[in-house]
């Protein structure tokens, strides 16, 4: 699996000839202005919840490349009315897609569309295939449920966790989340995009190293391998 950071919580995962985009929010993000959104071609968009900073570009990308959405029931119905097809899931469930198995995990947050419409429950995703296992947490607090992950899912090789505080976990809680899910390699997300979530990068890294975990703050536009 190859992971590319498109800023905020938006990541491209390339795996087994398939391209997955998580939480598309690029065009309104000043920090991601060098990403050419018109060139993005993906097979699936995995959307954690209905807040604008996680799905702003779903419609344009969906229309430009025919990508399918994987998300909760309410978000799938929302995009179906706009002519974009999808696959609905909910917490605790899994489904075998052509690129691998996806589990839909709990996230403690909220989820409404920009106009106030109900956006279903927020979630995260675990992606598993023969190349490895990746956890994308979405916007969430630290939850005790994360302790169940090692009992329920394949060993997580890499996790994308929010660390920006205010709306989600801070880096100290996220380092504990890494411990709960038994994962040593973490990519941080949901930080620095706007005023409420500015972080001290050195402090964040030391919060993780205290737990014996490695935090990567992947520059926008850059990639790494699982
Ligand atoms: Ni949110
Ligand atoms: Mn958010």
Image (cartoon, helix red, strand yellow):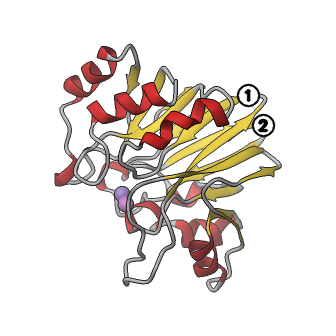
Residue 159 horizontal side relative to residue 42, left or right: left
Q: Residue under circle 2? A: 16
Q: Residue at x 42, y 68 (%)?
A: 111
Q: Position of residue 191 (x, y in %)?
A: 29, 44
The quadrant holding residue 198 is: top left
Q: Residue at x 62, y 58 (%)?
A: 45
Q: Residue under circle 1? A: 131
Q: Position of residue 53 (x, y in %)?
A: 38, 62
Q: Residue at x 43, y 83 (%)?
A: 117
Q: Is mark 2 within 8 Å of ligand 2?
A: no
Q: Which mark is residue 70?
A: none
| Residue 1 visible in the displayed image | no
Q: Position of residue 42 (x, y in %)?
A: 67, 54
| Ligand 1 quadrant in view | bottom left
| Residue 184 visible in the displayed image | yes
Q: Dots 1 and 2: beta carbons under 8 Å?
A: yes
Q: Position of residue 3 (x, y in %)?
A: 56, 35
Work out whether mark 1 precedes mark 2 in sequence or the reverse, and give the earlier one.
2
Q: Residue at x 46, y 29 (%)?
A: 180
Q: Is residue 66 above or below residue 44?
A: below
Numbered-mark total: 2
């Amino acid at each position: 699996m190859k992971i590319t950071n498109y800023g905020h919580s938006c990541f491209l995962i390339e795996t087994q000839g398939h391209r997955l985009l998580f939480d598309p929010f690029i065009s309104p993000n000043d920090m991601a202005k060098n990403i050419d959104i018109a060139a993005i071609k993906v097979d699936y968009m995995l959307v954690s919840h209905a807040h604008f900073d996680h799905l702003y570009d779903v419609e344009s990308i969906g229309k430009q490349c025919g990508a399918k959405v994987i998300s909760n029931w309410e978000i799938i119905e929302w995009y179906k009315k706009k002519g974009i097809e999808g696959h609905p899931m909910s917490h605790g469930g899994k489904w075998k897609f052509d690129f691998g198995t996806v589990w839909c995990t709990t996230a403690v947050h909220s989820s409404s569309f920009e106009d106030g419409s109900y956006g279903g429950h927020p979630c995260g995703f675990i992606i598993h295939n023969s190349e490895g296992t990746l956890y994308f947490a979405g916007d969430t607090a630290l939850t005790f449920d994360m302790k169940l992950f090692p009992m329920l899912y394949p060993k997580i090789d890499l996790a994308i966790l929010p660390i920006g505080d205010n709306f989600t976990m801070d880096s100290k809680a996220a380092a504990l989340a890494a411990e709960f899910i038994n994962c040593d390699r973490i990519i941080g997300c949901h930080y620095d995009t706007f005023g409420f979530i500015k972080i001290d990068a050195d402090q964040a890294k030391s919060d993780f190293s205290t737990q014996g975990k490695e935090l990567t703050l992947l520059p926008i536009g850059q990639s790494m391998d699982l």
